[in-house]
Image (cartoon, helix red, strand yellow):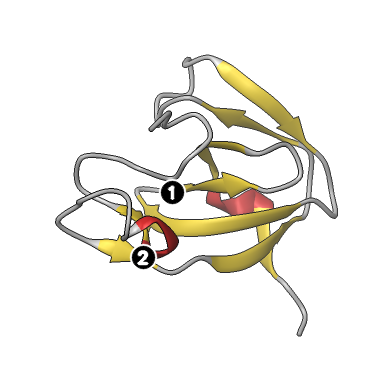
Amino acid sequence: MDPRFNAVRRDLADVRLADRVFAPHYAAPVLMVIARETPLRAARDGDSDVRAALVPGDVFEVFELAGGNAWGKAPGCGLVGYLDETALVRASS
């Protein structure tokens, strides 16, 4: 399973993938919205490869918030990665 397109790490995975992958922990996505332009990166490190540039209004599915970063999936482009959690706001219901 390609972790660039599927929210899967050794320690955590998207609960929607539980029938296809084992992980010690699963998380349900929390829908957030991008508030300012921000890069979606391959790793937590601010110098890691940029997978996509997300713009205000893009939806982001958050699986983890830690150390000022959010790890999740941008369904618009289908990519998984890390971004600065301050670039996110809660999606209105």
Q: Position of residue 53 (x, y in %)?
A: 74, 29
Q: Is residue 65 left or right of residue 87?
A: left
Name the residue at the left extreme.
24
If the image is split into quadrants, where does the N terminus sit?
Answer: top left
Label number found at residue 93: none
The image quadrant that residue 26 belongs to is bottom left
| Closest to the observer, 55 or 27 | 27
Q: Residue at x 76, y 44 (%)?
A: 76
Looking at the rendered image, the disc whose residue lies closer to the viewer, 1 or 2, is 2
The residue type indicated by label 2 comes to: Ala
Q: Residue at x 65, y 54 (%)?
A: 60
Circle 2 is placed at which residue position?
A: 27
The image quadrant that residue 25 belongs to is bottom left
The residue type indicated by label 1 comes to: Gly
Dot 2 lies on which element? strand
Q: Position of residue 82 (x, y in %)?
A: 49, 38
The image quadrant that residue 55 belongs to is top right
Number of numbered markers: 2
Circle 1 is placed at which residue position?
A: 68
Q: Is residue 30 above or below residue 73?
A: below
Q: Position of residue 58 (x, y in %)?
A: 79, 51
Residues at circles 1 and 2 in contact by the CB criterion of under 8 Å = no
| Closest to the observer, 41 or 20 | 20
